[in-house]
Image: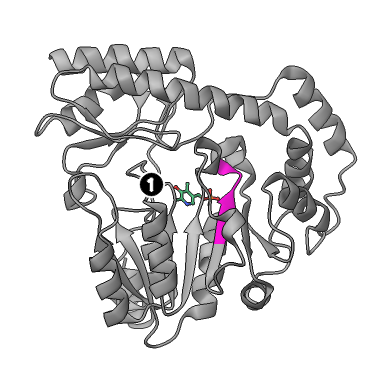
Amino acid sequence: MSDSLNDLVSHWVRPEIRALTAYRVQSAAGLIKLDAMENPYTWPAALRDAWVDMLRGTAVNRYPDPTAHALSERLREAMAVPPGMRVLLGNGSDELIQMIAMSLSGASASVLSVEPTFVMYRLIAIFCGMRYVGVPLQADDFSLDLPAVRQAMEEHQPAVVFLAYPNNPTANLFDESAVVDIIRAAPGLVVVDEAYAPFTDASFMQRLGEFENLVVMRTVSKMGLAGLRLGLLAGPPAWLNEFDKVRLPYNINVLTQASAEFALRHRQVFDRQTRQIRAAREGLAAAVARLPGVRVYPSQANFLLLRTPPGMATPWFDGLRDRGILIKKLDGAHSLLADCLRPTVGTDQENDALIAALGEVSAD
Ligand SMILES: *Cc1c(COP(=O)(O)O)cnc(C)c1O
């Protein structure tokens, strides 16, 4: 790049954007893919055929329904959104996080969350020119440090607090009463992000309406439709009517609307798959916990957080990749995640391959 072009870009692009590195996804070509919390199962052949038949009648020359009405109603029912609450759809929950941040941003506005957590809360805060405050979780078990969160809220007066429930990448569920304390003490909005709802029995969905500042976010990504990019926000109309104003027109495309509605009509298939993943999680956790020197943290999600013996996260991660298995290396991402790895729960065969490969790399 020429000096003058460099100067031009640095002059005009915001410094906080220039300081970022673009969100990168590691290549999974040819590998068993256990890095991104995807549902490993495809659809039964008959269901796939019926889906393709349905798509034949979908008009891609037309703009989608701008309000995605039929799909919204289907999601409202599938996710048991309480009456009186509004729903708003996003192109993935990432887009909903962005809509919330754009609506609340301002010169002095901040976003607060805990650390380590889902990185998009921090990144989107930066995109929107907001300050980000990350309050560390407790080092021993990744539970909420309630006094620290309360003190940070007092000090920074965040416009919005994001809490992933269960949390990614720590896999645990925060104490419900601690979350309620945070909702009660927060000066602004609290978003409870339930991306992993299919893998736990806990939820704040039925508590919507009990607090003026609570909204609940869900996604179809982890239940088995990550490729469609569809998230849902549920909460009091007074909040969601405002967020709706920054939504780009037609943000949910025709194919996603038709396919997600179709899939939700056959929800029992996905319910069966997510039940299978929950059951497999327990077997995988027990097998990994038997490896010498490994700590497995309790999981309420479709992935495991594990801590290797000191200094072994990189050699084990590389060793797994050499054996054809891709997981996520967390070591280096946050000080509380030293020596940590995060495999997604896969099919029985994939989990067996992971256990065998972990056995080998841990014996090296
Ligand atoms: C994976 C994940 C999401 C993903 O959302 P999309 O709907 O795929 O954009 C949201 N929140 C958390 C905590 C996640 O781990």
The answer to whether the beta carbon of the residue marked 1 is less than 8 Å from any atom of ligand 1 is: yes
Q: Compare residues 85 and 162 and report the one nearer the observer.
A: 85
Quarter occupied by the N terminus: bottom left
Residue 46 located left or right of residue 328:
right
Q: Compare residues 60 and 256 and report the one nearer the observer.
A: 256
- Above or below, 38 against 173 in this view is above
Q: Furthest-bottom residue in view?
A: 107
Q: Furthest-right residue in view?
A: 57
Q: Residue at x 18, y 26 (%)?
A: 294
Q: Secondary structure at mark 1?
A: loop
Question: In this figure, which residue is indicated by the disc labeled 1?
Answer: 168
Residue 205 located left or right of residue 354:
right
**What secondary structure do most residues of the magenta stretch adopt?**
strand
Q: Residue at x 51, y 64 (%)?
A: 97
Task: Choose top left, top right, bottom left or bottom right for residue 43.
Answer: top right
Residue 238 located left or right of residue 159:
right
The residues colored magenta run: 216-221
Look at label 1 and name its amino acid.
Asn
Residue 63 at x, y percent in the picture: 82, 60
- Above or below, 118 against 306 in this view is below
Residue 270 at x, y percent in the picture: 65, 30
Q: Is residue 35 visible?
A: yes
Q: Is residue 124 visible?
A: no
